[in-house]
Image: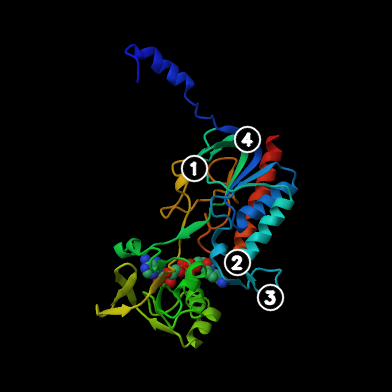
Amino acid sequence: MMAADSGATILEDKEDAPKIPERKKTKFDVVIIGAGPSGYTAGIYCSRAGYDTLILSGILPGGQLVNTTEVENYPGFEKAIMGPDLMIEMRRQTERMGTTIVDDECVDVDFRNNPFKILTSSEEYEGRAVIIATGANPRKLGLEGEQTFAGKGVSYCATCDGPFFRNLELIVVGGGDSAIEEATFLTKFATKIHLVHRRNELRASKVMQERAFRNEKIKFLWESEVIDIKGDQKMQQAVIRNIKTNEETVLDVGGLFVAIGHEPNTRLFKNQIDMDNEGYIILKNKTHTNIEGVFAAGDVHDRSYRQAVTAAGFGCMAAIDVDKYLTEKS
Ligand code: NAP
């Protein structure tokens, strides 16, 4: 029990209390935030140019390709390579070049002064140059049921979750390459796929469209949108509305895959880095952002191409720009 003259005791307690450890400072020439194709490629180039380079990979390294099945359009692989395998190869190559890779999440940045500060929950890193390669995240439909049934029927990753949906009817929403790729992949497990798209033509590349049109398991619901997701413990139904006629249809389905694009992962840099109204980083010149010494590469600024190979290309460009910047500075 605490003594009556407890002031001294409290003070002693405070002195004895374990101190919150100060963040360990770790200095690098270049800090790359993000470990997709752009981040890894930037790491390879920066390390090869002799810079002490750190990649902060986040908690799910590998970027969007980790959620992709076969990649047929990344040069160097005569036969298709699985997305996750490609990212493992890239990581190994980057590490072999001497890049330090830390699987931790960046929680804050301070770009006001150089060296820049890049913080995780336990560490403070410093970089003379920074490359932002944080990529983009899947876009949500914005329905209440989407949250209620997330992980209980609603998914954003066919590759990750497809095998859990065997012998069920499923919905895929979207009309781009992702939606078509996911729908095609899911036909391995599902009895039928309803592809719900808001327009009457697909955005996906012709070759992928044709593959999907030939697949008898995929049924297209044109000019339609999902307006509600229903169920009990798991999702059981989705309500589809025809945009032109307003007619509503209830589909009994065991799962719904949302594949409607992505949002750039730039929240951390708000108020420090110039962005457009959708949060894509604006490049001022080549890969330079508005802050001298801070560069951006990949889907975080690129809304046009968004391919693994273009992201890798941007990573290379950012690293070359970093080299020029650091050389001129020293
Ligand atoms: P995307 O090309 O932006 O397509 C998004 C699709 O979702 C569009 O059809 C869009 O409709 C629809 N959409 C957007 N917001 C919606 C909403 N709120 N409600 C309903 N529908 C909505 O995105 P992506 O398919 O994820 O592809 C991104 C990039 O990666 C593309 O450049 C693509 O070529 C590439 N990619 C390539 C491969 C491959 O080559 N293997 C695989 C996947 C992705 P609208 O068409 O009406 O705009």
- Which badge, 1 or 3, is on the more N-terminal residue? 3
Q: Amino acid at mark 2?
A: Gly
Q: Residues within 10 Å of mark 2 (few under 14, many from 20)?
A: many
Q: Which residue is mark 3?
A: 79
Q: Is residue 286 above or below residue 232?
A: above
Question: Which residue sits at x=48%, y=53%?
Answer: 265
Q: Which residue is mark 2?
A: 83
Q: Are marks 4 and 1 in contact (CB under 8 Å)?
A: no
**Residue 264 placement (x, y as % from top left):** 47, 55
Q: CA distance from mark 4 to mark 1?
A: 16 Å
Q: CA distance from mark 2 to mark 3?
A: 13 Å
Q: Which residue is mark 4?
A: 26
Q: Nearer the viewer, residue 193 or 51?
A: 193
- Which badge, 3 or 4, is on the more N-terminal residue? 4
User: Tag 3, which secondary structure?
Assistant: loop
Q: Nearer the viewer, residue 85 or 290?
A: 85
User: Tag 1, which secondary structure?
Assistant: loop
Q: Quadrant of residue 73?
A: bottom right
Q: Nearer the viewer, residue 92 or 267?
A: 92
- Which badge, 2 or 4, is on the more N-terminal residue? 4
Disc 4 residue lies near ligand 1 with CB under 8 A: no
Q: Nearer the viewer, residue 160 or 278?
A: 160
Whether residue 114 is visible, yes or no, is no
Whether residue 153 is visible, yes or no, is yes
Give the number of the disc on residue 107.
1
